[in-house]
Amino acid sequence: MYETRLHPPLPLPRFLRRMLMHALVALVLVAGSLALGMAGYAYFERLPWRDAFLNSAMLLGGMGPVDAPRTDGGKLFAGFYALYAGLVFIIAIGVAAGPIVHRILHKFHWEQKN
């Protein structure tokens, strides 16, 4: 997927396209996770979609839920979703930042080689 250190760094237009594709993957991951959280809160806690969105978005952003769960199923869902949301946050940052880190390291190795 990425060029090896034997190949020169990508030209800027191709690098920007790579950044855009990675950002889109991260966006799809976050949007899908938000939809999953909204569906879970709507199902287990019977929250309206706006409140379900708020709780899901707050958990994905690392802030925590706004409405405390009241049902046993809602409590289990909220706990598992909180663990999942933490991982999604880390993965999305890694996917979005991956091309930048690769380019920096690649340029460093390319300059050492030449």
Image (spheres, rainbow, N blue to C red):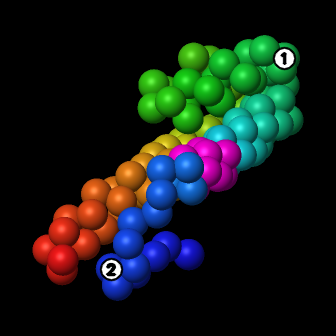
Q: Amino acid at mark 2?
A: Arg
Task: Report the Cα–Cα distance between label 1 and label 2.
Answer: 52 Å
Numbered badge on residue 64:
none
Q: What secondary structure is the magenta-colored segment mainly?
A: helix
Residue appearing at x 55%, y 35% in the figure: 60
Q: Is residue 8 left or right of residue 19?
A: left
Q: Nearer the viewer, residue 70 or 19?
A: 19
SS at badge 2? loop
Q: Amino acid at mark 1?
A: Pro
For the question of whether residue 97 can be seen, the reply is yes
Q: Residue 78 appears at what percent x and percent y?
A: 62, 39
Position of residue 107 in the picture relative to residue 36 (left or right) = left
Residues packed near mark 1 inside 10 Å, few (<14), some (14 to 19) or many (20 plus): few
Residue 66 x %, y %: 57, 17
Q: Is residue 80 visible?
A: no
Question: At 50% from the left edge and 30% from the top edge, which residue is drawn?
Answer: 61
Question: What residue is disc 2 on?
Answer: 5
- Quarter holding the C terminus is bottom left
Query: Is 11 placed left or right of 30 in the picture?
Result: left
Q: Which mark is residue 48?
A: 1
Q: Give 87 or 65, whichever is nearer the viewer.
A: 87
Q: Quadrant of residue 56?
A: top right
The number of numbered discs placed on residues in the rendered structure image is 2
The stretch in magenta equals: 16-26
Residue 73 in picture, x, y percent from top left:
73, 42
Near-viewer residue (12 or 61): 12
- Closer to the chain start, of discs 1 and 2, is 2
Residue at point 61% right, 46% down? Answer: 20
Could you tell me which secondary element the residue under label 1 belongs to?
loop
